[in-house]
Image: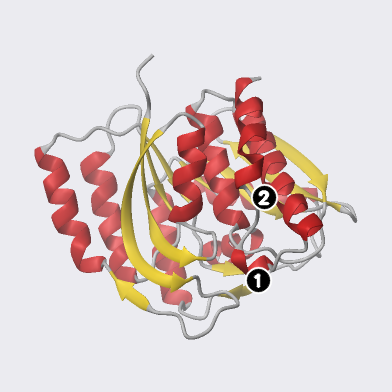
Amino acid sequence: MAQKRVLTIQDISCVGKCSLTVALPILSAAGIETSILPTAILSTHTGGFTGYTFRDLTEDVVPIAEHWKTLDLKVDAIYTGYLGSEEQQQLMADIFRDFKGTGTVVLVDPAMADNGKLYPAFDEKFALGMRDLCKRADIIAPNLTEASYILEKPYPGEDYDQPYIEQTLRELAALGPAQVVLTGVSFEKGKLGAAAYDRALDSFEYYFTERVEGYYHGTGDIYSSALLAGILNEKPLADAIRIACEFTVGAIRRTRAAATDPKYGVDFEHELAALITLLGE
């Protein structure tokens, strides 16, 4: 069987595991050839660190893509994560147009907000630009905060129930994506997981694990990368969200047990063997 190839488009944070430094090893461990398009290079990620350096690579996106066109590059998936500007959002729409072939899966992780607030660099206009990008995707994987901004709805906090989540999933799917995965969902104390909706089947899927207290940077990127790994390994949506949940929480548990400073990211590296096992089941 021919090896599948994914193009992932995110920033590189040199210290603090997130974005490309987690997407590349996770997808590679899953047996997927992973091509990258860096959107920026930072000395560290922006969560919990100060004084970091930042180099914007927006001007490099078009020349790189133009070279790839001369190669007639084919990809099985395009996966976007953290984007730094509205200009980059617009460039991603061009990438989708130029490199999405028959059967190519486009996954957008609209990484822009958490805990009821947009990240400091973003505003409501950026959120609406991300909504436009989600319309072009096959799969989107927002958290509840990001979903609220995309839909221009009030953030519910923890005051929601299953009908609210299912209505939110339907509204997100109505924008265009065939499948929606909503992360950070909980219906009972001590449990946390994901809810998913398949528009073609009009079906919902849920998976929950034990909640690990604390805030761990980069786990959304880890989840989305593992989710795509499952999908490209021909797993049904229900299995893909389960695999991503188990892999992510396993990495969090290792980090908590080691009492590692969470701003440096979680120990997903020692959990990769478990991911490979899960994908092989």
The N terminus: image quadrant: top left
Q: Amino acid at mark 1?
A: Pro
Is 40 rendered above or below residue 177?
Answer: below
Say left or right for 100 vs 62: right
Say what secondary structure mark 2 lies in: helix
Colour pattern: secondary structure
- 76 and 60: which one is in front? 60
- Measured Cα–Cα span from mark 1 to mark 2: 14 Å
Q: Is residue 170 visible?
A: no
Find residue 260 and report its horizontal and vertical position in percent.
Answer: 72, 64
Residue drawn at (65%, 71%), measured in percent from left and top? 154
Residue depicted at 52% across the width and 63% down the height: 150
Q: Position of residue 192 (x, y in %)?
A: 79, 51
Which residue has dot 2 on it?
167
Q: Badge 1: how crowded within 10 Å, few (<14), some, or many (20+)?
A: few
Q: Residue furthest left?
A: 70
Q: Residue at x 69, y 48 (%)?
A: 251
Which x, y percent locates residue 164?
73, 54
Apparent side of residue 196 relative to residue 100 in the rendered image (left or right): right
Residue identified by numbered label 1: 154
Name the secondary structure under disc 1. loop
The number of callouts visible is 2
Question: In the rendered image of this protein, does residue 96 appear above or below residue 86?
Answer: above
Q: Is residue 266 left or right of residue 16?
A: right
Q: Can the viewer see residue 158 in this picture? A: yes
Tell me where residue 55 appears, x and y as whole percent: 31, 74
> Of all residues shown, which one is farthest toward the bottom?
51
Residue placed at 69% from the left, 42% from the top?
Answer: 245
